[in-house]
Amino acid sequence: MPFLDWVNKNQAKETSRDVPYHLLHQEQTYGDAADNLLIQGDNLLALKALIPFYAGQVKCIFIDPPYNTQSAFEHYDDKLEHSQWLSMMYPRLVLLRELLAEDGSIWVTIDDNEAHYLKVLMDEVFGRNNFVSNVIWQKRFSPNSTAVHLSDSHDHVLSYAKAKQSWCRRQHPTATDYFYPDFVAELQDGRVLIVEYKGEPYETNDDSREKKQAGDQWERSSGGRCLFLFAVKSDEQGRNVAGQLAAKIGG
């Protein structure tokens, strides 16, 4: 697998290990949001401070790093030399990976200035096999009148899993594809509920039978931790979908 190399890369790799731990000082609380944190300060120090408490526990991370557009804005300078930008990103990505749970994922917005370098950098930190997708989102709907060459209208969202196999564990294989349920929820008691709904005339076709068998087997093998409901408009007991849900969760 190819790797990026740049001036001071070795120092950047050591930074995530050498940056000191800091205690967070509570300034103020807001309402009942006792489990939420709003941290003000250097994000590298903040990430290192979170590691002892939240390492391996975070399900989803979204970051919007500087795009390195070579522009100066009111609140921050977005004009780093390319190697400086890479050295800034590397240790933060390493710490973010430590925070992710095994079934967690990270989503990073970026534009064309650094997107392709960031992709290779994240391949190195998270593993190329854990790359999920480059989501393209349209950021404008009219041409940029100040564009010198092409008027680009998109940015990128790079998505990686901590461990892609674990992140996709709620997909069930079928004979020809993967089974993506219609609804997935974690109940208050910690159980996981998966619902697949089929209306007529699809209740009894081969695809539906195979999905029902896969879901039923998943429920049986979970030791009571998982529930699977193959919901229909009206079941054999005459219950609608709400009644079927209540029976599955309560039963």
Image (cartoon, helix red, strand yellow):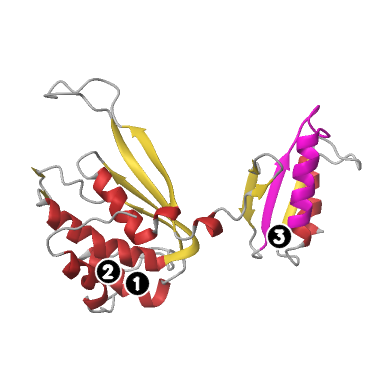
Label at residue 50: 1
Q: Which residue is mark 2?
A: 46
Q: Which residue is mark 3?
A: 226
**Whole-percent x and y of residue 14?**
22, 73
- In whole angstroms, how far apart are the C-alphas of marks 2 and 1? 6 Å
**Whole-percent x and y of residue 187?**
65, 59
- In whole angstroms, how far apart are the C-alphas of marks 3 and 2? 36 Å
Left or right of 20? Residue 138 is right
Task: Decide: is 193 above or below 157.
Answer: below
The span shown in magenta is: 191-218
Q: Secondary structure at mark 2?
A: helix
Q: Secondary structure at mark 1?
A: helix
- In whole angstroms, how far apart are the C-alphas of marks 3 and 1? 31 Å
Residue depicted at 37% across the width and 78% down the height:
52
Question: Crowding at label 2, few (<14), some or many (≥20) Cα neighbours within 10 Å?
Answer: some
User: The disc labelled 2 sits on which kind of residue?
Assistant: Ala
> In the picture, which quadrant includes the N terminus?
bottom left
Residue 225 belongs to the span the image colors magenta: no
Residue depicted at 80% across the width and 45% down the height:
243
User: The disc labelled 3 sits on which kind of residue?
Assistant: Cys
* Residue 64 in view (yes/no): no
The quadrant holding residue 60 is: bottom left
The quadrant holding residue 181 is: top right
Task: Decide: is 164 above or below 70.
Answer: below
**Whole-percent x and y of residue 46?**
27, 69
